[in-house]
Amino acid sequence: MTLNDKLATIQTKFKSKKSRFNSFGKYNFRSAEDILEATKPFLLELGVSVKIDEELLPFASGTLPIIKSTATVSDGENAIHATALVGVDLNQKGMQTPQQFGSASSYGKKYALGNLFLIDDTADSDATNKHGKAPMAKTKNTLTSKSDPAFLKAKDYVKAGGKVEAIKAKYALSKEIEAELTTL
């Protein structure tokens, strides 16, 4: 059985309940720890291991620090990786700096694991909770800064053969960003 087959087995059989409750937002959610706990039965059965690495990406003054979380499944010979980028909000009220980084780290781990194991969080409270606000009309995201994590993803996408037009379908690009992506 190849590593791809083993990962596909985990992806199709994976079950992780949203066993945690956010009393402020009144919703259930799952954490990175819940996801890791749910993978444990597969590790020995399939002969794989799972690990998460984190990296603080370089950032320019005045921008958010970005944590890159990489979840990896390996059979000892081959490995498959999935990543997530999360900004650290240093202006988040009620949190000290270590808590701000810890919160971003937890989110990054959760979403890297979700990307690896194909956990659909569209029905997750993080995606659906309105926090008491009325829904806004759907508009195209704007990409105007080279420090935006979406710009880094867009650059990687274009370098891997993706089309700038596909990015323009999702984002309104500044002239500077479009020129930068076009020259890759």
Image (cartoon, rainbow, N blue to C red):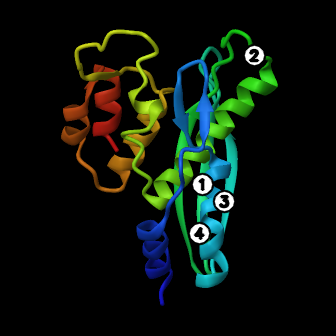
Mark number, residue 73: 4
Q: Is residue 57 visible?
A: no
Q: Is residue 155 visible?
A: yes
Contact, mark 3 vs mark 2 (Cβ under 8 Å) = no
Q: CA distance from mark 3 to mark 2?
A: 27 Å
The amino acid type, in three-letter code, at marker 2 is Met
Which mark is nearer the camera, 1 or 2? 1
Against 110, residue 67 (above or below) is above
Which residue was labeled with disc 1? 35
Q: Earlier in the sequence, mark 4 or mark 2?
A: 4
Q: Earlier in the sequence, mark 4 or mark 3?
A: 3
Which residue was labeled with disc 2? 95
Q: What residue is drawn where x is 57% and y is 34%? A: 86
The amino acid type, in three-letter code, at marker 4 is Val
Q: What residue is drawn where x is 49% and y is 33%? A: 149
Contact, mark 1 vs mark 3 (Cβ under 8 Å) = yes
Q: Quadrant of residue 36?
A: bottom right
Q: Earlier in the sequence, mark 1 or mark 2?
A: 1
Contact, mark 4 vs mark 1 (Cβ under 8 Å) = no
The amino acid type, in three-letter code, at marker 3 is Glu
Q: CA distance from mark 4 to mark 1?
A: 13 Å
Which residue was labeled with disc 3? 37
Q: CA distance from mark 1 to mark 2?
A: 25 Å
CA neighbours of label 3 inside 10 A, class few (<14), some (14 to 19), many (20+): few
CA neighbours of label 4 inside 10 A, class few (<14), some (14 to 19), many (20+): many
Image coordinates of residue 5 in percent, x first then y, are: 44, 81
Q: What residue is drawn where x is 60% and y is 54%? A: 35
177 and 71: which is toward the camera = 71
Contact, mark 4 vs mark 3 (Cβ under 8 Å) = no
Against 92, residue 13 (above or below) is below
23 and 63: which is toward the camera = 23
Q: CA distance from mark 1 to mark 3?
A: 5 Å
